[in-house]
Structures are given as C-alpha cells and as structure tokens.
Amino acid sequence: MTRLLNRLPRRRARLVTVLALILFAGSAITPDARAEPRSFTLDPAHLHVGFLTEHIGFARTLGVFRDVEGTVVFDEEAPALREIDVTVRTDSVDTGHDARDEHLRSDDFLAVDEYPEMTFTLTEATQTGENTGTITGDLTMRGETHPVSLDVTLNKTGRYPFGDEHYAVGISARGSLKRSDWGMTYGVDNGLVGDRVEIIIEAELIREEE
C-alpha cells in the first residue's frame, strides 16, 4: 500500500526532477536554462512524496515517504533526459501513527527488512499540453517491477525570489497503482485496506549552477 515509488541507485535528486524536466523543456524553460545537459536537485524544504488509500471505506489514510534521493541530468535544448536515478527508503514511511507505520513496514506491506529501498525508472514521456504531460516508468517494489504512469503539471520556472535566488522548477504529479500487483494483498479481499493507492507528488527543484 505504501510502496509507491521504487528504488534506484543512489545519487541525490528527485523523482520530481524527472517529472518536470522531461516533459516541458521545449515549451516552458526560459532561455538561460537552455544549453547543455544540467543537473537538478530537490529543494528538501519543498518536497512531498505521498499516498492515499481507503481504510474500511470510512476515510482515506494519507501518508508520505520522508527519505527520497536520486539524480537527474537533463539536456533541455535537445530535449533529452540523460540520466535518472531515484531511490525511496521504504522505512521512511510516515502516516502519523506509530503502530500503523510499523505494520506498513512489515511483510504485509513494504517488507522493509528485505526490501529497504524502492525505485522508479523512467521509460517514456509524452507532452499533453503547454504545461502538462504524462510520464511512464518502471516501479520496482518488493522485488517486482511494473509500469506506473503519472500526470505531471509544470507549475512555474524561474529565479527564486528569496535567499540565493537560484533557478527553480515547481511541479505537481498525480497517479495511482494497485498494490496487489506488487504482492501486497493484505486487507484487499475483506475490504479493510484499499487496493488502489493514489500517488501525490509536490516538489520544487533547484538547478545546479556551474
């Protein structure tokens, strides 16, 4: 239920980097950002990788992953994605309830002892509008890999108005998956926990300056 994103080799950046840059380099990045392959990193103060799933039909449970790492190198002039590595630590799941979080870390769900990371690898990107697009990638979780698609919106690009005034990219992404496809079947048959998991990503990215 919580294994939304997956594991990849470690290098700092973000799942989010992927989302914004692949789709919109040609239409929404300003000229000073268009040159050669550049690296983007996550702004740790503005990252939310979350999920929603049904709880016995009464309400949906909201959770997040607190530890997300990776790297993205993107050629905005091509445009072409040169590199993407994203890793989520499964034991960083947080729903605001200790007992529930421990259950999510158990073999019923994330099995964090055996699978401490999950990864997402981009396979395809399609632009659907001036600032929107869809990305599809391989999500590896609990030792299984299946495709997941996300609808992405590029919210804004430009110089950040505070602090070091870095060049920033802001994106929102939404998608869903069936956790049972990754072997997480606890509570599905009796309706205790929903099988469908909604993915929620809100993030700001910082362009690494040369």
Image (tube, grey):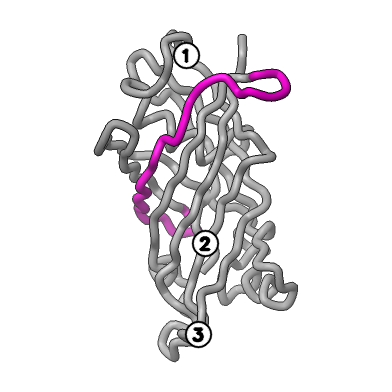
**Residue occupying the far front of the picture:** 161
Instruction: Check contact, mark 3 vs mark 1: CB within 8 A.
Output: no
- Image quadrant where one finds the C terminus: top right
Q: Is residue 208 above or below residue 125?
A: above
Q: Is residue 166 left or right of residue 83?
A: right
- From the top left corner, tell me how far across and down residue 131 is, in percent: 34, 34
Q: Is residue 17 left or right of residue 174?
A: right
- Secondary structure, mark 3, is loop
Q: Where residue 33 is drawn, which disc sits there?
A: 1
Instruction: Looking at the image, tell me whether mark 2 or mark 3 is earlier in sequence order.
Output: 2
Nearer to me, 157 or 78: 157
Instruction: Looking at the image, tell me whether mark 2 or mark 1 is earlier in sequence order.
Output: 1
Q: Is residue 202 above or below residue 143?
A: above
Disc 3: which residue: 58
Q: Main secondary structure of the magenta part?
A: strand
- Secondary structure, mark 2, is strand
- Secondary structure, mark 1, is helix
| Location of residue 45 (image quadrant) | top right
Dot 3 crowding, Cα within 10 Å, few <14, some 14–19, many 20+: few
Q: Where residue 51 is drawn, which disc sits there?
A: 2
Camera-side mark, 2 or 3: 3
Q: Name which residue type carries label 2.
A: Phe
